[in-house]
Image: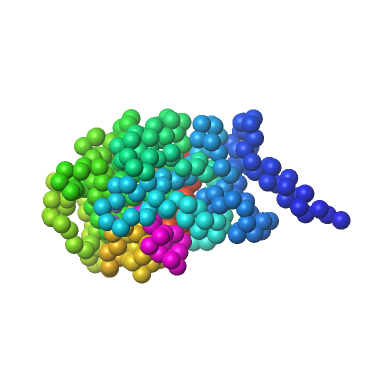
Amino acid sequence: MVDRCADERAKTRARTPAKTPAKTRAERLARFQPASGMVTPRFSGLASFMRLPVLDPAEAADQVEIGLIGIPFDGATTGRPGARLGPRAVREASTGTRALNHATGVAPYVLAPCADLGDVPVNPVDTAETARRIEAFYRPLAEAGIVPLTVGGDHFITGPVLRALGAARPLGLIHIDAHSDTDDAQYGGSRLTHGTPFRRAVEAGVLDPRRCIQIGLRGSMDAADERDWALAQGMRILTMEEVCARGLPEVAAEARAVAGEGPTYLSFDIDALDPAFAPGTGTPEIGGFTTREALHLLRGLRGLDLVGADVVEVAPSLDPAGITALAGAGIAFEILCLLAERAAARA
Ligand code: MN
Ligand code: MN
């Protein structure tokens, strides 16, 4: 009689990164596979991102090409908190994502070795200290050429990630969001909030504003300054009204044209989606993308030189139905497919 449990234990051991580093790319690809839902049920086991092996970031160099990372921090949220719970909820929801993208045919784990590198050790009560810890976490990954796919956390976390990834040269940016997040300061002078990361990143010289595009902006603003400042730097803004008028293929084409050939970061704020699809977020705005439109938009971004990406502002405590984390996991998988194609092209 076949002992299926023993069989599965052997497979689990095979998936666990061994102490001896894999030598060839084929070996690494074989080692860093997600647990199959055809072998162990998707509701079982520890919930890592996409059911991938968990790897200590200190051991990631020369092993994986894409690292999925959580940043459970929402201490820079100005409105409704809860995004600190995002990474855990998205890990759980992501256990339902399978290995093959039905629309594009991309099989990310065949194209690139990927692992869950755990969470950045944030300090929930100290924003500046957390920024330092995020940058320190990402710098060695950037130096090792590992492309991070981050799940936040509020949008503040993108700033220190960009400081690490853009340290060698300024990056382009495709920023999908209901908001510009280019405020100067909030609450009488606080410059480190989830409404300011892209202004700080341009000031730090880690973003090239002329290669930045913001897509899906809408709703109301406290003042025109955030928009006017972004436009004055040369950033392109495509409001949701323009997106609707022009259609998704044109929007994707313009995003590709603005970002160009150079290294580019992709940042997806879940509040870009309509609250009907993502109610669990800090600053919901009506009139947003459907999840289907977001997938189509992302599929229009294939072939860019993406050096990192994130999905932020998933606040599961504001969404008892769990659809926001589900949307976050689906968006993260779609982005992972983009990153894996780029990794394979470079290998
Ligand atoms: Mn945002
Ligand atoms: Mn937003």
The region drawn magenta spans 311-327
Q: Nearer the viewer, residue 128 or 338?
A: 128
Residue 119 in view, yes or no: yes
Depicted 303 relative to depicted 291: above or below: above
Q: How many marks?
A: 0
Q: Is residue 236 left or right of residue 5?
A: left
Please give the name of the residue rendered at 81% of the width and 53% of the height, measured from the top-left corner: 3
Q: Is residue 206 left or right of residue 116?
A: left
Query: Within the image, what quadrant is residue 137 found in?
Result: top left
Query: In the displayed structure, would residue 269 be above or below residue 126?
Result: below
x then y, percent, for residue 283: 28, 59
Nearest the eye: 157 or 50: 157
Taking the spot 16% from the left edge, 43% from the top edge, the residue there is 189
Above/below status of 317 relative to 195:
below
Give the colour scheme shown: rainbow
Q: Is residue 312 magenta?
A: yes
Please give the name of the residue rendered at 38% of the width and 37% of the height, measured from the top-left corner.
134
Left or right position of 77 against 18: left
How far from the left and from the top, in percent, is residue 33?
60, 46
From the top left corner, tell me how far across and down residue 93 is, in percent: 50, 58
Residue at the limit of the structure toward the right, as seen here = 1
Q: Residue at x 61, y 58 (%)?
A: 42
Quadrant the N terminus occupies:
bottom right
Q: Is residue 15 left or right of residue 54?
A: right
Is there any visible trace of residue 198 in the rendered image?
no
Residue 319 magenta: yes
